[in-house]
């Protein structure tokens, strides 16, 4: 298939998320005529949603630690992040009039915490540079002549472009536009795509009806979550998580979610341990809980002797046999290390991001698909994953920039 029937300096960007818009900017800055196509009525919907809870743009930790967050895909992303990493991203945002600050966790947020001002200024600048936007254009692949096929409210449209950047996102929160429907379109052209899987996701635990009815929606905090995966590496994090109708979710759980998901996939189950009384010493807890409870209820006993209330007390009742609840030593041990079985990750659509995607091995260093000369890929649709902390957006921006610039270089040399 020839996707470049009209060699010129036109670049079609498909997908107007952070990766696609950054590709559009890079291609436009390099002198290309740029058209952005998106299936939705407006661009950047997931980016705007990310801004709802406080947009975490990037992270300020040292380079080595930052790069380690990309795990097995680090080697592929490192050259892209070397060209457009956290510092460059902050400078870029400042260029759009949006200053940023480092939070206490080292995470970087735009002042104002929102995505909307940044997106507004960015779209204004892109339009002023001549970038054209075509909304409600759902890409459906290529026709027999190599033209891009779009489904639009006016019917199907065929578009020819010198080069194409696909920035179609992963498969989570499909209602915001990234549906993952592109997977078979690329697979049909022999492009290897690792199945899209939930990343930064919650998990099902199989709560009893009683526990679910009482505690769904309640936070468990402070808590230390400990996970020792099959690799033997023990990780622990203090923070909080939320009890949901089916299990647990929240930032502290997302931090372990890739390893938990992989273990469940391999073994059908994974196990966390919860320290429900961080900072309290086990021996002291045993001593406290050994003091007779007299006529007071178990709830009062736990509150007074161990500071355990609400969903924490509910978890002990849900997960411990009654003999353990009645035994001070066993109860104290459970408070410090309560095993919690996870039986399934929540579905991809609910996840913050997707793992899986287009294999880096099928791309060249400019992010062009080797089997489809002139077609580039960027953003979450590539096969990498990272925890929350700004790593997702940083890699989307960096890969978008590389793909947009790469498309123009390719056009120039074609
Ligand atoms: C609730 C939530 C909060 C988040 N918070 C953060 C955060 O604070 N920090 C962080 O780093 N990351 C965060 N993320 C993740 C981050 O938003 C994504 O990783 C990022 O938006 C991915 O960018 P992208 O450009 O690759 O894809 P997307 O942003 O998903 O954009 C893809 C675009 O492609 C379009 N598209 C898809 N298929 C087609 C098609 N066939 N034809 C035409 N157009 C199509 C879609 O409409 C969409 O506009 C959050 C995600 C969620 C869901």
Image (cartoon, helix red, strand yellow):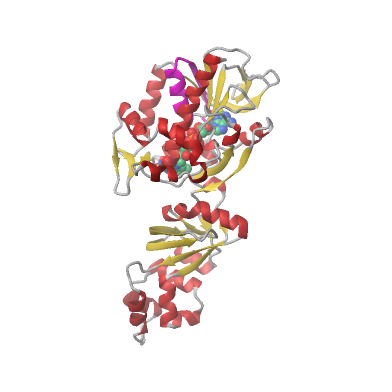
- In the depicted structure, whether residue 13 falls above or below residue 130: below
Counting the numbered discs, the total is: 0
Closer-to-camera residue (93/137): 93
Q: Which quadrant of the figure has residue 180?
A: top right
Q: Which quadrant of the figure has residue 398?
A: top left
Location of the N terminus by quadrant is: top right
86 left or right of 403?
Answer: left
Q: Tell me which residue sits at (40%, 76%) in the image.
A: 332
394 left or right of 372?
Answer: left
**Magenta-drawn segment:** 20-40
Closer-to-camera residue (25/202): 25
Q: Tell me which residue sits at (54%, 68%) in the image.
A: 208
The percent position of residue 108, horizontal first and vertical second, equals 33, 41
Q: Which quadrant of the figure has residue 268?
A: bottom right
Regarding residue 378, the answer to whether it shows in the image is yes
- In the depicted structure, whether residue 283 falls above or below residue 193: below
The percent position of residue 75, horizontal first and vertical second, equals 49, 39
């Amino acid at each position: 298939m020839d996707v470049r029937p009209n060699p010129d300096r036109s670049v079609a960007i498909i997908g107007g998320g952070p990766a696609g818009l950054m590709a559009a900017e890079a291609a436009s800055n390099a002198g290309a005529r740029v058209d952005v196509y998106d299936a939705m009525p407006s661009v950047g919907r997931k980016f705007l949603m990310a801004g709802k809870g406080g947009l975490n743009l990037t992270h300020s930790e040292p380079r080595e630690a930052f790069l380690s967050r990309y795990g097995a895909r680090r080697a592929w992303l490192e050259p892209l992040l070397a060209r457009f990493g956290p510092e460059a991203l902050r400078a870029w945002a400042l260029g759009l009039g949006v200053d940023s600050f480092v939070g206490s966790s080292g995470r970087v947020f735009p002042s104002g915490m929102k995505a909307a001002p940044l997106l507004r200024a960015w779209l204004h600048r892109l339009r002023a540079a001549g970038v054209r936007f075509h909304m409600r254009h759902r890409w459906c692949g290529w026709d027999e002549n190599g033209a891009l096929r779009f489904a639009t409210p006016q019917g199907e449209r065929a578009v020819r472009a010198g080069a194409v950047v696909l920035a179609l996102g992963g498969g989570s929160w499909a209602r915001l536009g990234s549906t993952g429907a592109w997977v078979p379109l690329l697979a049909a052209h022999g492009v290897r795509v690792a199945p899209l899987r939930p990343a930064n996701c919650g998990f099902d635990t199989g709560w009893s009806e009683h526990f679910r009815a009482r505690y769904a929606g309640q936070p468990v905090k402070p808590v230390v979550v400990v996970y020792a995966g099959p690799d033997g590496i023990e990780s622990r994090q203090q923070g909080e998580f939320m009890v949901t109708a089916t299990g647990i979710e929240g930032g502290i759980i997302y931090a372990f979610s890739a390893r938990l998901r992989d273990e469940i996939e391999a073994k059908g189950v994974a196990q966390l341990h919860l320290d429900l009384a961080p900072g309290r010493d086990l021996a002291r807890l045993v001593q406290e809980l050994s003091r007779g409870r007299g006529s007071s209820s178990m709830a009062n006993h736990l509150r007074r002797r161990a500071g355990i209330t609400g969903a924490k007390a509910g978890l002990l009742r849900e997960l411990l046999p009654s003999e353990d609840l009645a035994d001070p030593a066993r109860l104290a041990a459970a408070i410090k290390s309560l095993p919690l079985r996870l039986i399934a990750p929540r579905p991809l659509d609910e996840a913050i991001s997707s793992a899986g995607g287009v294999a880096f091995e099928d791309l060249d260093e400019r992010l062009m698909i080797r089997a489809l000369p002139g077609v580039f890929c960027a953003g979450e649709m590539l096969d990498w994953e990272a925890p929350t902390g700004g790593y997702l957006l940083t890699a989307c921006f960096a890969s978008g920039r590389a793909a947009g610039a790469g498309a123009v270089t390719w056009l120039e040399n074609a």
